[in-house]
Image: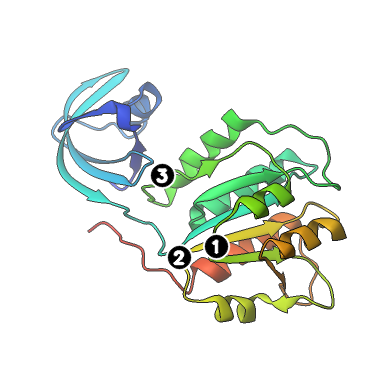
Amino acid sequence: MTTNFYAPPSALRGRRVVLPEAEARHLRTVLRAQEGEEMVVVDGEGGWYRARIDHLTPDQVVGTITEQREDVGEPAIEVTVGLGILKKRSRFETFVEKAVELGVRRIVPLRTRRTERNSIRKDRLRSVMVGAMKQCRRSWLPTLTAPQSPESLASASDAAAEFVCHSGDDAVPLHRAAGRARPFDEALVLVGPEGGFADSEVEAAVSAGGTVVSLGPRRLRAETAGLAVLQALIGPAASERAPN
Protein backbone atom coordinates (compact mmCIF):
# COMPACT_ATOMS: atom_id res chain seq x y z
CA MET A 1 0.00 0.00 0.00
CA THR A 2 1.62 3.24 -1.16
CA THR A 3 -0.55 5.67 0.84
CA ASN A 4 0.65 6.98 4.20
CA PHE A 5 -1.81 7.48 7.05
CA TYR A 6 -1.64 9.92 9.93
CA ALA A 7 -2.18 9.03 13.57
CA PRO A 8 -1.09 11.38 16.37
CA PRO A 9 1.22 9.98 19.07
CA SER A 10 -1.79 9.58 21.38
CA ALA A 11 -3.17 6.95 18.97
CA LEU A 12 -0.14 4.71 19.45
CA ARG A 13 0.18 2.47 22.51
CA GLY A 14 3.12 0.12 22.55
CA ARG A 15 2.84 -1.92 19.35
CA ARG A 16 -0.82 -1.00 18.81
CA VAL A 17 -2.08 1.79 16.56
CA VAL A 18 -5.66 3.00 16.14
CA LEU A 19 -6.29 5.24 13.14
CA PRO A 20 -8.42 8.38 13.55
CA GLU A 21 -11.94 8.00 12.19
CA ALA A 22 -11.37 9.93 8.95
CA GLU A 23 -8.20 7.97 8.17
CA ALA A 24 -9.92 4.68 8.97
CA ARG A 25 -12.84 5.52 6.71
CA HIS A 26 -10.50 6.32 3.80
CA LEU A 27 -8.58 3.09 4.29
CA ARG A 28 -11.74 1.02 4.48
CA THR A 29 -14.09 2.60 1.94
CA VAL A 30 -11.75 4.16 -0.62
CA LEU A 31 -8.78 1.81 -0.61
CA ARG A 32 -10.86 -1.20 0.47
CA ALA A 33 -8.10 -2.57 2.66
CA GLN A 34 -8.44 -6.01 4.22
CA GLU A 35 -7.35 -7.47 7.53
CA GLY A 36 -3.84 -8.87 7.27
CA GLU A 37 -2.64 -6.21 4.83
CA GLU A 38 0.07 -3.71 5.73
CA MET A 39 -0.22 0.04 6.09
CA VAL A 40 2.27 2.84 6.79
CA VAL A 41 1.45 5.30 9.56
CA VAL A 42 3.25 8.52 10.49
CA ASP A 43 2.72 10.36 13.76
CA GLY A 44 3.75 13.88 12.68
CA GLU A 45 6.60 13.93 15.19
CA GLY A 46 9.16 11.98 13.20
CA GLY A 47 7.77 8.51 13.82
CA TRP A 48 7.25 6.18 10.84
CA TYR A 49 5.52 2.83 11.37
CA ARG A 50 4.73 -0.17 9.26
CA ALA A 51 1.73 -1.96 10.70
CA ARG A 52 -0.37 -5.03 10.02
CA ILE A 53 -4.12 -4.41 9.91
CA ASP A 54 -5.73 -6.61 12.56
CA HIS A 55 -9.25 -5.25 12.88
CA LEU A 56 -11.52 -3.31 10.53
CA THR A 57 -14.88 -1.67 11.17
CA PRO A 58 -16.55 1.14 9.18
CA ASP A 59 -15.10 3.75 11.56
CA GLN A 60 -12.08 2.09 13.11
CA VAL A 61 -8.86 0.44 12.01
CA VAL A 62 -6.57 -1.22 14.54
CA GLY A 63 -3.12 -2.45 13.63
CA THR A 64 0.02 -3.99 15.11
CA ILE A 65 3.32 -2.21 14.48
CA THR A 66 5.87 -4.47 12.80
CA GLU A 67 8.56 -1.90 11.99
CA GLN A 68 9.45 1.51 13.37
CA ARG A 69 11.80 4.18 11.99
CA GLU A 70 12.54 7.83 12.66
CA ASP A 71 12.61 10.96 10.47
CA VAL A 72 11.74 9.17 7.24
CA GLY A 73 11.39 11.60 4.35
CA GLU A 74 12.93 14.53 6.22
CA PRO A 75 15.61 16.88 4.80
CA ALA A 76 19.00 17.41 6.39
CA ILE A 77 18.25 21.02 7.41
CA GLU A 78 15.32 22.56 9.27
CA VAL A 79 13.92 25.66 7.60
CA THR A 80 11.47 28.13 9.12
CA VAL A 81 9.64 30.34 6.62
CA GLY A 82 7.85 33.51 7.62
CA LEU A 83 5.51 34.65 4.83
CA GLY A 84 3.43 37.80 4.85
CA ILE A 85 -0.29 37.08 5.00
CA LEU A 86 -1.63 37.34 1.46
CA LYS A 87 -4.77 38.99 0.12
CA LYS A 88 -6.12 35.71 -1.21
CA ARG A 89 -6.38 32.88 1.27
CA SER A 90 -6.16 30.36 -1.55
CA ARG A 91 -2.65 31.52 -2.41
CA PHE A 92 -1.50 31.25 1.18
CA GLU A 93 -2.98 27.75 1.35
CA THR A 94 -1.15 26.80 -1.84
CA PHE A 95 2.09 28.05 -0.34
CA VAL A 96 1.53 26.06 2.84
CA GLU A 97 0.77 22.86 0.93
CA LYS A 98 3.81 23.12 -1.36
CA ALA A 99 6.12 24.24 1.45
CA VAL A 100 5.26 21.07 3.37
CA GLU A 101 5.96 19.00 0.26
CA LEU A 102 9.36 20.68 -0.15
CA GLY A 103 10.36 19.97 3.45
CA VAL A 104 9.70 23.10 5.55
CA ARG A 105 9.79 22.52 9.32
CA ARG A 106 7.93 25.63 10.55
CA ILE A 107 5.60 28.16 8.91
CA VAL A 108 4.98 31.59 10.44
CA PRO A 109 2.27 33.88 8.99
CA LEU A 110 3.62 37.43 9.15
CA ARG A 111 1.64 40.56 9.90
CA THR A 112 3.60 43.33 8.22
CA ARG A 113 3.03 47.00 7.51
CA ARG A 114 1.73 46.05 4.06
CA THR A 115 -0.30 43.02 5.07
CA GLU A 116 -4.01 42.87 4.42
CA ARG A 117 -5.91 42.26 7.66
CA ASN A 118 -7.08 38.83 6.64
CA SER A 119 -7.43 36.13 9.25
CA ILE A 120 -5.68 32.78 9.13
CA ARG A 121 -7.93 29.72 9.18
CA LYS A 122 -5.62 27.56 11.25
CA ASP A 123 -7.82 24.44 11.22
CA ARG A 124 -8.08 24.57 7.45
CA LEU A 125 -4.33 25.10 7.05
CA ARG A 126 -3.56 22.23 9.41
CA SER A 127 -5.75 19.94 7.32
CA VAL A 128 -3.85 21.04 4.21
CA MET A 129 -0.56 20.34 5.97
CA VAL A 130 -1.58 16.85 7.08
CA GLY A 131 -2.62 15.99 3.53
CA ALA A 132 0.67 17.27 2.12
CA MET A 133 2.71 15.41 4.74
CA LYS A 134 1.03 12.13 3.82
CA GLN A 135 1.20 12.77 0.08
CA CYS A 136 4.95 13.40 0.04
CA ARG A 137 5.68 10.67 2.62
CA ARG A 138 7.15 12.80 5.35
CA SER A 139 7.14 11.81 9.01
CA TRP A 140 7.13 15.33 10.55
CA LEU A 141 4.07 17.57 10.48
CA PRO A 142 5.50 21.11 10.31
CA THR A 143 4.55 23.63 12.96
CA LEU A 144 2.13 26.42 12.05
CA THR A 145 2.47 29.29 14.51
CA ALA A 146 0.23 32.22 15.34
CA PRO A 147 0.79 35.32 13.19
CA GLN A 148 3.57 37.64 14.33
CA SER A 149 5.67 40.50 13.04
CA PRO A 150 8.84 39.93 11.00
CA GLU A 151 10.78 41.94 13.59
CA SER A 152 9.76 39.64 16.44
CA LEU A 153 10.43 36.50 14.43
CA ALA A 154 13.89 37.66 13.38
CA SER A 155 14.89 38.83 16.85
CA ALA A 156 13.83 35.55 18.48
CA SER A 157 15.55 33.32 15.93
CA ASP A 158 18.76 31.49 16.73
CA ALA A 159 19.09 29.91 13.27
CA ALA A 160 22.62 29.77 11.91
CA ALA A 161 21.51 31.30 8.60
CA GLU A 162 18.84 33.97 8.11
CA PHE A 163 17.68 35.30 4.76
CA VAL A 164 15.39 38.24 3.97
CA CYS A 165 13.86 38.33 0.49
CA HIS A 166 13.85 41.95 -0.65
CA SER A 167 14.79 43.74 -3.84
CA GLY A 168 17.43 46.41 -3.51
CA ASP A 169 20.96 47.38 -4.40
CA ASP A 170 22.35 45.64 -1.32
CA ALA A 171 20.63 42.31 -2.04
CA VAL A 172 22.93 39.33 -2.51
CA PRO A 173 21.95 36.50 -4.88
CA LEU A 174 20.49 33.74 -2.73
CA HIS A 175 22.81 31.02 -3.99
CA ARG A 176 25.82 33.14 -3.07
CA ALA A 177 24.52 34.04 0.39
CA ALA A 178 23.61 30.44 1.12
CA GLY A 179 26.99 29.24 -0.09
CA ARG A 180 28.76 31.63 2.25
CA ALA A 181 26.63 30.51 5.21
CA ARG A 182 27.04 26.75 4.70
CA PRO A 183 27.27 24.43 6.45
CA PHE A 184 24.16 25.06 8.55
CA ASP A 185 21.41 22.80 9.86
CA GLU A 186 18.82 25.50 10.60
CA ALA A 187 17.71 28.47 8.53
CA LEU A 188 15.15 31.26 8.73
CA VAL A 189 13.58 32.78 5.62
CA LEU A 190 11.50 35.96 5.62
CA VAL A 191 9.26 36.74 2.64
CA GLY A 192 7.00 39.77 2.52
CA PRO A 193 3.39 39.98 1.28
CA GLU A 194 2.32 41.66 -1.94
CA GLY A 195 4.39 44.83 -2.09
CA GLY A 196 7.20 43.37 -0.02
CA PHE A 197 8.57 44.47 3.33
CA ALA A 198 8.82 48.07 4.47
CA ASP A 199 12.38 49.37 4.72
CA SER A 200 12.15 49.49 8.52
CA GLU A 201 11.23 45.80 8.63
CA VAL A 202 14.20 44.90 6.46
CA GLU A 203 16.52 46.98 8.62
CA ALA A 204 15.28 45.26 11.77
CA ALA A 205 15.82 41.82 10.25
CA VAL A 206 19.33 42.73 9.13
CA SER A 207 20.13 44.08 12.59
CA ALA A 208 19.05 40.71 13.99
CA GLY A 209 21.55 38.91 11.73
CA GLY A 210 19.67 38.48 8.47
CA THR A 211 21.11 38.77 4.98
CA VAL A 212 19.10 40.52 2.27
CA VAL A 213 18.84 38.21 -0.74
CA SER A 214 17.47 38.38 -4.27
CA LEU A 215 16.04 35.60 -6.41
CA GLY A 216 17.00 36.96 -9.80
CA PRO A 217 15.72 39.55 -12.26
CA ARG A 218 12.12 38.35 -12.51
CA ARG A 219 9.36 39.64 -10.27
CA LEU A 220 7.83 36.74 -8.37
CA ARG A 221 4.63 36.42 -6.42
CA ALA A 222 5.24 36.20 -2.69
CA GLU A 223 4.22 32.55 -2.46
CA THR A 224 6.43 31.67 -5.44
CA ALA A 225 9.40 33.43 -3.87
CA GLY A 226 8.93 31.51 -0.63
CA LEU A 227 8.88 28.18 -2.44
CA ALA A 228 11.88 29.10 -4.59
CA VAL A 229 13.93 29.86 -1.48
CA LEU A 230 12.88 26.61 0.17
CA GLN A 231 13.96 24.53 -2.79
CA ALA A 232 17.23 26.42 -3.12
CA LEU A 233 18.10 25.78 0.53
CA ILE A 234 16.75 22.28 1.04
CA GLY A 235 17.46 20.81 -2.39
CA PRO A 236 21.29 20.90 -2.27
CA ALA A 237 21.28 19.59 1.31
CA ALA A 238 18.73 16.85 0.72
CA SER A 239 19.59 13.55 2.36
CA GLU A 240 16.13 12.24 3.08
CA ARG A 241 15.74 8.87 4.67
CA ALA A 242 13.20 7.05 2.55
CA PRO A 243 11.39 3.84 3.42
CA ASN A 244 12.35 0.65 1.64
Residue drawn at 37 percent across, 29 percent down: 23
> Residue 180, position in %: x, y?
57, 81
Residue drawn at 32 percent across, 18 percent down: 59
Give the labeled residue for mark 1.
187
Which numbered tag is attached to residue 134? 3
Q: Classify 37 as above or below 235.
A: above
- Quarter occupied by residue 4: top left
Mark 2 / mark 3, whichever is N-terminal: 3
Query: Mark 2 or 3, which is nearer the eye?
Result: 2
Which numbered tag is attached to residue 185? 2
Q: Considering the numbered disc 2 on the image, is that residue within a helix, a strand or a loop? A: loop
State how far apart marks 1 and 2 are (Cα): 7 Å
Q: Are marks 2 and 3 in contact (CB under 8 Å)?
A: no
Q: Is residue 18 visible?
A: no
Which numbered tag is attached to residue 145? none
> Residue 105, position in %: x, y?
49, 51
Few, some or many residues within 10 Å of mark 3 (<14, 14–19, 20+): many
In-front residue for pair 84/31: 84
